[in-house]
Image (tube, rainbow, N blue to C red):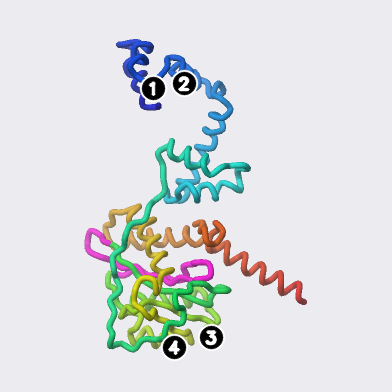
Amino acid sequence: MEEMIVFIDDHRGNYGVEAICRVLPVAPSSYYHHQAVKRDPSQASLRAQRDAVLAAKIKTCWEASGKRYGAVKVWHDLAAEIEGLARCTVVRLMKGAGIQGVTRGKGKKTTHSNPALPCPEDKVNREFNAPAPNILWVADFTYVRTAVGFVYVAFIIDVFARFIVGWQVSSSPNTKLVLDALDQALAARNPDRDRLTHHSDRGVQYLSIKYTERLEDAKIGASVGSVGDSYDNALAETINGLYKTEVIEHEGPWSGKKDVEMATLQWVYWYNTKRLFGPLGYISPATAERNFYNEELTAKIAAE
């Protein structure tokens, strides 16, 4: 409709509104009403006025997500603020505005295993659930193509609320990359290590002597996928997929390691503190952890 209105505006001086409307599927009265509303928005219907207000809020919410959110997350983000907001309304207005969330593609295999390396048992068995923070961490890394070659990004995720507790960017997919991510996680969390299990795939970096010794020194139980496919480390693979979709494919191309590092820093902060997750009840990882500790404190006070 908007394109036809613009066409009429551009050619009405030569052909007249009525003549153009006889060719286009637009009634002259609709065109004149559109122009009247453009001059005075209060002449629009109540529904149209509400749509205009909602469309502005939806666009603000979508932009605040880094233009990553689709209609479902936008709807959940605005539902608390706007009473009675229907998901179909958000879908309709986003479609009308020509905006949409990012969509995920297929990833590239980065895991290279060595059958000769000793391998811990699989203590997770594809059950990626934890009753509290710092009970189960999962680790994985992915690649990013830049103008000067590949860089690699490692993550460590706390399974309870999908909180990214450690990450690192490197020009080489070596053991130091994953060790640095682990050390960052340990420094940030200082977990009760006798309770903590670290799970990874069969990548040689995670089965290396240095990495194994670091886990042993920290008294963290090691777990490695038994089958060796992506389902063995599905949660970490999922977070890698989100990162590739919401940062690498969405914001690229990339000139080198430094700009990947800065974008990753910004995304991890947004992801942990702002990003809504359906399995968490459409709240952020930080909110989910805060709610857990608040409930734990309330129960402790009640028991005293």
Q: Residue at x 34, y 68 (%)?
A: 153
Quarter where residue 155 is shown: bottom left
Is disc 4 placed on a helix, strand or loop? helix
Report the residue marked by disc 3. 194
* Residue 135 badge: none
Q: Amino acid at mark 3?
A: Asp
Amino acid on which the number 2 mark rests in the picture? His
Pick whichever of labels 2 and 4 is earlier in the sequence. Answer: 2
On screen, residue 34 versus residue 297, left or right, reads: left
- Identify the secondary structure beneath mark 3: helix
Nearer the camera: disc 4 or disc 1: 1
Q: Is residue 5 magenta?
A: no
User: Label 1: how many residues lie within 10 Å, few (<14), some (14-19) or many (20+)?
Assistant: some
Task: Find residue 33 and report its horizontal and vertical position in percent.
Answer: 48, 18
Q: Quarter of the image containing the N terminus?
A: top left
Q: Earlier in the sequence, mark 4 or mark 1?
A: 1
**Disc 3: CA contacts within 10 A as few (<14), some (14-19) or many (>=20):** few
Q: Name the residue tied to disc 4.
A: 216
Q: Are marks 3 and 4 in contact (CB under 8 Å)?
A: no
Q: Quadrant of the image for the C terminus?
A: bottom right
Using the numbered discs, state the Cα–Cα distance from disc 2 to disc 4 in whole angstroms. Answer: 71 Å
Q: Which class describes the residues within 10 Å of circle 2: few (<14), some (14-19), or many (20+)?
A: some
In the image, residue 228 above or below residue 98: below
Between disc 1 and disc 3, whose residue precedes? 1
Which stretch did the figure color magenta?
145-170
